[in-house]
Image (cartoon, rainbow, N blue to C red):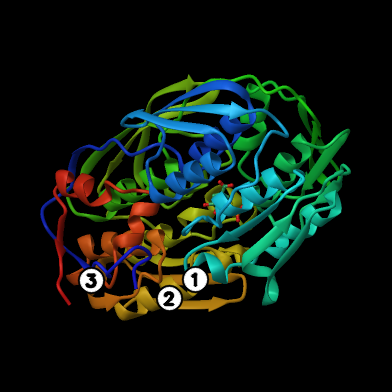
């Protein structure tokens, strides 16, 4: 079932080579944060290049429900008139975050230190995901959460009237948990400290500093320690959202496995906490180059050029790299299916609690398409078919997960027989123009009626 209506099956089949330039949308992580911090500053924040995917639109609606003025002026161009730290109003309705774990977890953090109650819900995927990882540290600030069994949504959060600062070591590598704690720390006196054993994406830290918060990061024996001083006056910003490396991953990987392809994906943010996939592909022998390397808004960026790479080999992906490519394992497993030899992916328990259990979801996709895969609680291993090619020829389940749907469709672009996804509508959460862009490059995607 689709999140917002009837299922929309989509079939992908082998066509000619993929060629051309593809402008992928804005970064999802940065887009959420721009709206939230814009709402917590006093005055008008201007955003360009905002991702207009459903996840981000849901966060924008939530910010309006908390009292900020959120206005769209044109494609990707938005303004947020913020209410200041501590200025949120209690919404008079339930906050529906749709499919977005980032949206709901960051919002819970932002409201946890306001004296008000907010009820959150989401779609079937989000309502099945663990929220204790966020409500546990928020309880230390003084907030209370009452949800369904296992701490799942729908959930009501009663914010702390007199929050106390916390020092919190994240038990799982999660930028969402880290960010929820930092956002809660904004309306808390004193210093809030988060320690993470493994570095996760640092967009919150960078953007908080950009908005004028006092925030420092240092490496200690325990890991990365981030200290935020509460009650800052956040000043409105102009934010140009860079393009999303996690979306770029799809056309890049498609080009690597579709014969004769040559695709340019310009202006991709290459923040080291996000770029692990590209490093992995290079180690596998991908013909991938970074052109026009530069700095954009304090972040490294480049144009990515990917060409058909028939000689890729399986590798062991170092577990310490997992956080920097956590959303890219589904599409990596597709590339691994076409490589020669085994690709080992250890240290990835977090994949079990994403929009779907992504190891299980991709295991079903790959097996149905004739690829051998083994898995355990925190690892999986794909045996590539190399020169033998991938048979394909299956209808597979997207499980309300955009990245599973896109990965399966890319598989169908290079397999011998077509691959059909039962419901491609979740793709709109992060990459609404995926189908149009891939068709522009030469892909064959056709809507199926069941
Ligand atoms: C995100 C963090 C990651 C990632 C998600 C976006 C973020 O989740 O999977 O797509 O913007 O902070 P976790 O924090 O659960 O690892």
Q: Which residue is mark 2?
A: 363
* Residue 341, quarter of the rendered image: bottom left
Q: Earlier in the sequence, mark 2 or mark 3?
A: 2
Left or right for 349, reference 445: right
Residue 285 can be seen, yes or no: no
Mark 1–mark 2 distance (CA, rounded to whole Å): 6 Å
Outermost residue, front side: 92
Left or right for 316, reference 108: left
Q: Quadrant of the C terminus?
A: bottom left
Q: Residue visible at 69% across and 46% down?
A: 111
Disc 3 element: strand
Q: Nearer the viewer, residue 105 or 360?
A: 105
Q: Which residue is mark 3?
A: 420
Disc 1 element: helix
- Whether residue 368 is situated above or below residue 340 in the rendered picture: below
Q: Residue visible at 21% across and 49% down?
A: 438
Q: Residue visible at 65% across and 40% down?
A: 89
* Image location (x, y in percent) of residue 312: 36, 55
Crowding around mark 3 (Cα neighbors within 10 Å: few <14, some 14 to 19, many 20+) is many
Outermost residue, left side: 16
Crowding around mark 2 (Cα neighbors within 10 Å: few <14, some 14 to 19, many 20+) is many
Left or right for 23, reference 240: left
Please name which of the two marks, 1 or 3, marks the residue nearer to the observer. 3
Please name which of the two marks, 2 or 3, marks the residue nearer to the observer. 3
Q: Nearer the viewer, residue 448 or 393?
A: 448
Q: Which mark is residue 197?
A: none
* Image location (x, y in percent) of residue 80: 50, 28
Q: Which mark is residue 359?
A: 1
- Whether residue 142 is situated above or below residue 370 in the rendered picture: above
Q: Quadrant of the N terminus?
A: bottom left
* Residue 393, quarter of the rendered image: bottom left
Disc 2 element: helix
């Amino acid at each position: 079932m689709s999140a917002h209506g009837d299922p929309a099956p989509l079939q992908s089949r082998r066509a000619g080579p993929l060629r051309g330039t593809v402008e992928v949308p804005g970064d999802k992580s940065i887009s959420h944060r721009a709206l939230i911090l814009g709402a917590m500053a006093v005055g008008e924040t201007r955003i360009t290049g905002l991702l207009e995917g459903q996840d981000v639109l849901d966060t924008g609606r939530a910010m309006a429900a908390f009292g900020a003025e959120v206005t769209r002026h044109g494609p990707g161009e938005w303004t947020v008139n913020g209410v200041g730290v501590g200025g949120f109003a209690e919404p008079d309705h339930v906050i529906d975050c749709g499919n977005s774990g980032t949206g709901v977890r960051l919002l819970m953090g932002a409201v946890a230190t306001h004296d008000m109650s907010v009820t959150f819900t989401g779609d079937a995927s989000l309502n099945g995901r663990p929220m204790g990882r966020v409500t546990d540290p928020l309880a230390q600030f003084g907030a209370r959460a009452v949800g369904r069994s296992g701490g799942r949504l729908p959930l009501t959060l009663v914010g702390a009237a007199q929050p106390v600062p916390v020092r919190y070591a994240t038990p799982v590598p999660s930028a969402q948990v880290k960010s929820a704690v930092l956002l809660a720390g904004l309306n808390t006196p004193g210093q809030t400290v988060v320690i993470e054993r493994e570095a996760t994406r640092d967009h919150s830290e960078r953007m908080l500093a950009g908005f004028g918060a006092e925030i420092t990061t240092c490496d200690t024996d325990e890991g990365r320690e981030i200290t935020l001083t509460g009650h800052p006056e956040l000043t409105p910003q102009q934010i140009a959202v860079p393009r999303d490396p996690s979306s770029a991953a799809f056309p890049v990987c498609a080009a690597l496995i579709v014969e004769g392809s040559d695709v340019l994906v310009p202006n991709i943010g290459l923040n080291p906490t996000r770029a692990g996939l590209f490093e992995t592909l290079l180690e596998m022998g991908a013909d991938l180059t970074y052109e026009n390397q530069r700095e954009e808004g304090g972040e490294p960026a480049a144009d990515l050029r990917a060409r058909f790479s028939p000689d890729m080999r399986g590798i062991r992906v170092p577990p310490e790299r997992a956080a920097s490519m956590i959303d890219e394992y589904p599409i990596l497993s597709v590339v691994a299916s076409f490589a020669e030899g085994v690709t080992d992916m250890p240290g990835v328990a977090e994949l079990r609690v994403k929009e779907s259990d992504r190891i299980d979801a991709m295991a079903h996709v790959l097996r149905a398409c004739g690829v051998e895969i083994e898995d355990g609680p925190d690892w999986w291993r794909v045996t590539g078919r190399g020169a033998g090619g991938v048979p394909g020829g299956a209808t597979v389940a997207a499980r309300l997960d955009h990245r599973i749907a896109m990965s399966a469709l890319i598989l169908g672009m290079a397999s011998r027989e077509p691959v059909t996804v039962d419901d491609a509508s979740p793709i709109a959460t992060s990459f609404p123009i995926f189908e149009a862009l891939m068709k522009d490059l030469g892909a064959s995607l056709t809507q199926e009626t069941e």
